[in-house]
Amino acid sequence: MGPLAGQGLISPEFDYILALLIGIAFGFVLEQSGFSSAKRLAGLFYGREFVVLRVFFTAAITTVIGVILMEHFGMLDMNLVYIQPTFTWSAIVGGVIMGIGFLFGGFCPGTSLCAVSIGKIDAIFFFGGLFIGVFLFAEMYPIFEPLYHAQDLGGIFVFDSLGMSRGLFAALLIVMAVMAFVVTYFIEQYILKKPKQFNLAFIKSKPYHVAAIAVAMVFALIVGITPTRSQKIMAQAQECQQKSDFSYMSSVELAYKLLNPDNQTLYIDIRNADDFVKLALPKTVNIPFASITNREWEDFLGDATKKKVLIAHTEEQAQQAACVMQQLGYKHIQLLRGGFSEFEATIIKQHIPTTGMSDTEKTYIKKAHTEILQLIERNKKPILEKKVLTKAKGGC
């Protein structure tokens, strides 16, 4: 219930009660779907029972549709969802071991617990073996550790690996699931010696199935064209950039503010992390441009009592970031005129323009130059993406 709890719609305490109720409902659905039967589960490997495949595909596409739509409407921030890292070799070896256990025992860890709950003796022995396996793995972990962490690919997504958009992958997954439902149905009918001919009469005899397939295809189209919340905000920000009047701060003013800090101003550097580490101004926090829409920053940037000074490579990028922040409801935003490049040239490198600047400002630049460099030297550990919220972990 993370999205509802994160929005403040339910209390954290009630969140646990809902999780319990959802868990009970999940177990009930598994048992009613036949997941407590070892014969039915193992039948998938023998090509005669495809209930497991259909239930898992249904769960997958329901989750995909829910996640994409909730993320689009701002109910879920995928940047706060923990993605389990992929360790290639441990996944392969573990998958083979689990597959063999599934084939011979007729259960996976989750379905064995489902069968235990209704008193199946074979499942009780299987579940006991699971604890023995966990104990042995824990005791022998130093031996298995190199394999366990081999070839860490991080929290990757399938659609990124395939070089396609999230929406396109989700649409193709739904289409593939529907095709799997249809094909496995005919395979089962063939095994039962009740072959069916796919024609117009057959389609008319299955109105509910046809309606379900039509609904799935509609959702495939919806998720295929639905932009992410970040993409939607960025598109709105481009229109805002043409219309908005921005408040600016000069490089000289920023230098003075950095040397005379107050508690009412936040200095946000929206350059990427590599550039920020190379040269970071004192008192600044790094929030790369692409991360501004992340919900982890809501409390930090949403403080209406503080002014936010945006520092970007260029003034134009700062304008884009300001528009994004306005779309998110953040207020009191000011931009560094000319961007970081102008500040670096004027204050740090002392390329003082011959016109457009008073003698007082030129004198102050020479003074600020030395003090700013000293502060940068002392600021050896710049603030990188100050995390406000932690990622939620979980899974089956």
Image (cartoon, rainbow, N blue to C red):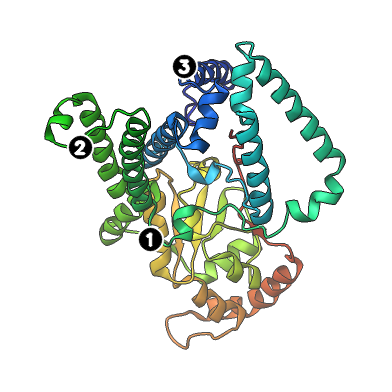
Residue 210: give x, y in percent of width and height.
Answer: 21, 31
Q: Residue furthest top?
A: 119
Q: What amino acid type is highlighted by mark number 2?
A: Phe
Residue 116: give x, y in percent of width and height.
Answer: 64, 16
Residue 348: give x, y in percent of width and height.
Answer: 61, 78
Please name the residue that numbered disc 1 is placed on.
320
| Mark 3, other Cα within 10 Å: few <14 / some 14–19 / many ≥20 | few
Q: Is residue 5 visible?
A: no
Q: CA distance from mark 3 to mark 1?
A: 52 Å
Q: What amino acid type is highlighted by mark number 1?
A: Gln
| Mark 1, other Cα within 10 Å: few <14 / some 14–19 / many ≥20 | many
First reached walking from the N terminus: tag 2 or tag 1:
2
Please name the residue that numbered disc 2 is placed on.
198
Residue 187: give x, y in percent of width and height.
Answer: 35, 36
Q: Is residue 241 visible?
A: yes
Q: How many marks?
A: 3
Report if the CB atoms under discs 3 and 1 are less than 8 Å apart.
Answer: no
First reached walking from the N terminus: tag 2 or tag 3:
3
Q: Secondary structure at mark 3?
A: helix
First reached walking from the N terminus: tag 3 or tag 1:
3
| Mark 2, other Cα within 10 Å: few <14 / some 14–19 / many ≥20 | few
Q: Judge left or right: residue 113 versus residue 61.
A: right
Report if the CB atoms under discs 2 and 3 are less than 8 Å apart.
Answer: no
User: Which residue occupies 66% across, 63% down?
Assistant: 282
Question: Of 84 and 364, which appears nearest the observer?
Answer: 84
Q: Residue furthest front?
A: 193
Please name the residue that numbered disc 3 is placed on.
32
Please tell me whether residue 203 is drawn above or below residue 79 in the rendered image.
above
